[in-house]
Amino acid sequence: MKIKLCIVVGARPNFIKAAPIITAIKKYRKEYKELTFFLIHTGQHYDENMSDVFFKEMGIPKPDFQLSIGSGNHGKQTGEMIEKIEEILLKEKPDLLVSIGDTNSTLSGALAAAKLHIPIAHVEAGLRLFNKNIPEEVNRLLTDHLSALLFVPTKLGKDNLLKEGMKNNTVFQYGDIMYDATLQFDKVAEKKSKVLKTLGLKKDEFILVTVHRAENTAHIDQLKTILDSFVEVSANHKIVMPIHPRTKNLLKEHNLLDHYSAHIQVTDPLGYMDMLVMEKNARLIVTDSGGVQKEAFFQQTPCVTLFENTAWVELVDLGWNNIVPPKSTKFITKNIMDVLKKKKGKAGSPYGKGNAAELMVERIITFLTAKHKS
Ligand code: UD1
Ligand code: UDP
């Protein structure tokens, strides 16, 4: 039986999560030649260091379709993606669409497929922050409710979906796809990356920070609250910030990039290999990124998460992640200083064995084979 999969990506975390899935598909193709896939890149992220670099470093094939949608308000960006993805799905007729994570590209792929009755597999299903003002929460909720196969990274993800009425036999807990990615690339990163030398850094002598969430970058006052804390902490600790274009644009708009760069070592966004090495060698990570919170744990580096809550509660329970809602500069600084004094978290392995992608591909094949027979 021929199986043709469509994978939709568009933003930085989509690329990183797609890499292990593509590796697993390629592995299966060795025995199962009838398994094929094509890749759609929506163009949500387009700068070289937000997109191409991940394709090159992680061996992701060139997209079969580059939609070049670019930036825009949610409705416009999502709408244009749906329109173009639909055209491709009508022509290519895949048996299943793989939607990954929680970006606008994730939701667009799912919506386009659902209307054409193409089954969807959602990778990283079931995560909830219980706040529908968060754009990613809307994307996750809708994608989950449209999907035939729900690949949850954690037990909590499964519980959330069952509470929302999903059927038990559609939910599969195989582990976290980013853990697969870290295991796949960690050694290569250590060999290849020269980032510590290039940036003049030594192990445990810097704090790695990333800030890009809409909630922290929509208004300059909120961003200033956070960055002013980094300035305070920089009196005693070197701070390095690979800057997301959204954050950079806001600082430039308010003529504040030079001001903060005088205290914080600001770099362009890093490639994945450099990022893994930075995360491993940092004394502490301070972030609002969903993915970086987890990678901090994979690299056994303590983390402060600048957000109201987290979907990765296992890491809070194990003592690796510290949730610090960024409400005032003083509050953030105090918490960063406290975490620097704390002992590291406990051992644990809440994210599977690093073979989630292989199990997902196997499950997709089983699902499609059964569907074909019925
Ligand atoms: C998106 C995702 C978010 C994810 C993040 C990862 C949604 C709703 N949000 O947020 O979940 O955590 O990606 O990084 O899908 N820009 C550039 N060059 C680029 C890409 C973006 O300059 O290559 C700038 C543009 O000014 C753009 C802004 O960044 O307007 C925001 O980009 P967008 O993709 O809309 O949202 P992110 O904040 O990146
Ligand atoms: N990342 C990267 N370079 C950077 C910042 C992040 O390679 O300069 C990687 C990071 O290692 C993780 C992923 O991007 O794998 C997380 O994506 P991001 O923080 O953009 O989004 P989120 O996870 O919050 O959706």
Image (cartoon, grey):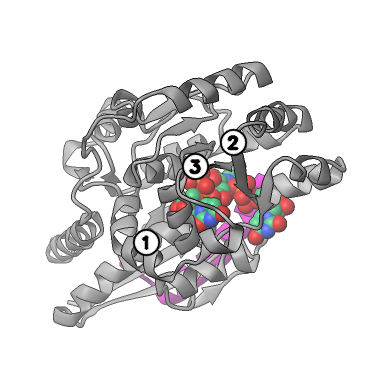
* SS state under label 2: loop
Query: Is 167 displayed left or right of 10 in the figure?
Result: left
x and y percent of residue 191 in the render? 38, 69
- CB atoms of marks 2 and 1 within 8 Å: no
Picture quarter containing residue 231?
top right
Q: In this picture, is 123 found above or below 228?
A: below
- Which span is picked out in magenta? 72-97
Front position in the image: 289 or 262: 262
Question: Does the residue tagged 3 have its C-beta within 8 Å of any atom of ligand 1?
Answer: yes
Question: Looking at the picture, which amino acid does disc 2 mark?
Answer: His
Q: Residue at x 52, y 39 (%)?
A: 136
Front position in the image: 158 or 337: 337
Front position in the image: 287 or 88: 287
Q: Residue at x 21, y 62 (%)?
A: 358
Looking at the rendered image, the quarter that the N terminus falls into is: bottom left
* SS state under label 3: helix
Residue 115 visible in the picture = no
x and y percent of residue 131 in the render? 51, 25
Marker count (numbered): 3
x and y percent of residue 177 in the render? 31, 52
* Local crowd size for mark 1, using a 10 Å CA cut-off: few (<14), some (14–19), many (≥20): many
Which numbered circle lies on residue 97? 1
Which comes sooner in the sequence, label 2 or label 3?
3
Q: Is residue 89 magenta?
A: yes
Look at mark 2 in the image and give the residue it sits on.
237
Question: Looking at the picture, which amino acid does disc 1 mark?
Answer: Leu
* Local crowd size for mark 3, using a 10 Å CA cut-off: few (<14), some (14–19), many (≥20): many
Q: Residue at x 62, y 32 (%)?
A: 236
Look at mark 3 in the image and give the residue it sits on.
139
